[in-house]
Image (cartoon, rainbow, N blue to C red):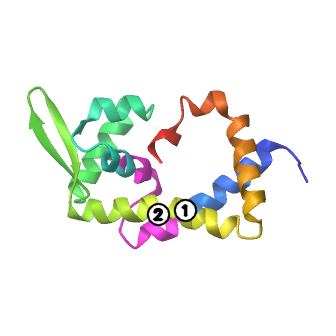
Amino acid sequence: MFHTLAYYATVLHRAFTSYTTRRLQTLGLHFGSLFLVIYVGKHPGCTQAQLTQDLKLDWGYSQRSITRLVEEGFLTRTKSGRSYRLNLSETGEEAFQVSHQVFFDWDREVLGALSDEEQAQLLSLLSKAIQKEAKDSLCTTC
């Protein structure tokens, strides 16, 4: 067995992806759309360019994903000058609530065997370990 941060990060990522996929399937939402829905929910009226830049996405991927979310009824896209403003639809609001809550529910499930003190210590150490990466990551959307 490997005892590296990379190994544990991979195991946790797979577990989180699987857990989240199961929770989002009931809404018809895909794991790949999770952060887009959360971003628009936290930044109503944002432009696609803002979303793409802040989430560090490829423009083509962003365009396809947003188009799909609009077609599936999660987002609305309204023309405003030369750009479009993105907002959550009613279905998108529900998806946002579930998407946002899934982080807390998964933490509670995975970290349940640890005491409150151990959880705080673990999260503090992980935060310190990724301090440089966190500035440029998706963490600001959660």
Q: Position of residue 124 (x, y in %)?
A: 71, 45
Amino acid type for the residue under numbered disc 2: Gln
Q: Is residue 56 above or below residue 72?
A: above
Q: Position of residue 109 (x, y in %)?
A: 65, 70
Q: Secondary structure at mark 1?
A: helix
Query: Can residue 58 be seen by looking at this rendering?
Result: no
> Residue 39: x, y in percent?
37, 45
Within 10 Å of the Cα at label 2, are there few (<14), some (14-19), or many (20+) other Cα atoms?
few
Look at the image and give the residue range highlighted in magenta: 19-36
**Amino acid, disc 1:** Phe
Judged from this view, the residue extending furthest toward the right is 1
In the drawing, what numbered circle is on residue 101?
2
Disc 1: CA contacts within 10 A as few (<14), some (14-19) or many (>=20) = few
Mark 2 touches mark 1? (CB < 8 Å): yes
Asked whether, in this view, residue 8 is left or right of residue 96, the answer is right
Q: Along the line of sight, which residue is nearer the eye, 108 or 96?
A: 108
Residue 96, quarter of the rendered image:
bottom left
Task: From the top left corner, tell me how far across and down residue 142 is, in percent.
Answer: 48, 48
What residue does disc 1 label?
A: 104
* Residue 100 found in image quarter: bottom left
Q: For the residue labelled by badge 2, is the local secondary structure a helix, a strand or a loop? A: helix
Q: Is residue 140 magenta?
A: no
Q: Which residue lies most toward the front here?
A: 117
State the image quarter where residue 15 is shown.
bottom right
Magenta region includes residue 26: yes
Residue at point 34%, 63% (across, down):
95
Left or right, 76 with respect to 33, comes to left
Q: CA distance from mark 2 to mark 1?
A: 5 Å
**Does 41 sit above or below residue 51?**
below
Q: Which mark is residue 57?
A: none
Using residue 70 as the reference point, say whether residue 117 is left or right of it. right
